[in-house]
Amino acid sequence: MNTTKELNTAYRLRHALDESSQHLPEKTLERLSSARKIALSRKKAEVAAPAFAPQLAGVSHTVRLPQSDNRFAWLGRMSVVIPLAALVFGLVGIYQYEQHQQIMELAAIDAEVLTDDLPLSAYLDHGFDAFVAKGQD
């Protein structure tokens, strides 16, 4: 694991610094100590962020659940991709359905016009539009 390597490196580095600090002059140690105190006084106060930790029924507080490793990291990425893909497919489906409905409505109008007793030239006449508008009032 990468975390174990980082912890080992940090431990070795701390150990080396502790050993070399024993050979520093007293004046340098005092300056380092005062610099550390100033840095700690300027440090921002830590704020405890609320965290949701579900309590499992029948599980004591001393039992630790195993840490998940990177075998299931793809599952987190899929939790975004799958809903997005479903949204895209849904929108495409709605678009196709609306197109089909519009084609069916136009086909129904064409069928009514073709099966009507009026000749097609009557629909092109401007007086016919006025007659239809007057008849609807």
Image (spheres, grey):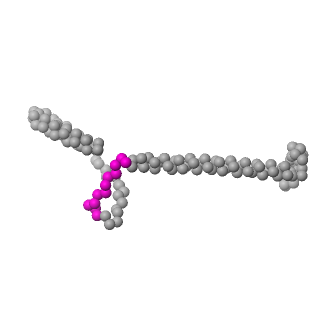
Identify which residue, 4 or 42, lies in the foreground. 4
136 lies left or right of 106 = right
Which residue of the protein is positioned furthest toward the bottom in this rendering?
A: 58
Predominant secondary structure in magenta?
Answer: loop
Is residue 54 in view? yes
Which residue of the protein is positioned furthest toward the front in this rendering?
A: 71
Which of the 4 quarters of the picture holds residue 10?
A: top left
* 67 drawn magenta: yes
Task: Say which residue appears at 70% left-offset and 51% top-offset.
Answer: 101
Task: Say which residue appears at 28% left-offset and 60% top-offset.
Answer: 63
Identify which residue, 55 or 32, lies in the foreground. 55
Q: Quadrant of the C terminus?
A: bottom right
128 lies left or right of 26 = right
Residue 30: x and y in percent read 13, 37
Give the answer, above or below, for where 65 lies relative to 96.
below
Task: Say which residue appears at 61% left-offset and 49% top-offset.
Answer: 93
45 lies left or right of 90 = left
Q: Quadrant of the N terminus?
A: top left
Which of the 4 quarters of the picture holds residue 31?
A: top left
Residue 15: x and y in percent read 16, 40
Residues in magenta, as a range: 60-71
Residue 73: x and y in percent read 39, 47
Task: Say which residue appears at 53% left-offset and 47% top-offset.
Answer: 85
Give the answer, above or below, for where 35 lies relative to 137.
above
* 41 drawn magenta: no
Is residue 42 in view? no
Give the answer, above or below, for where 127 lies relative to 24.
below
Residue 67: x and y in percent read 32, 52
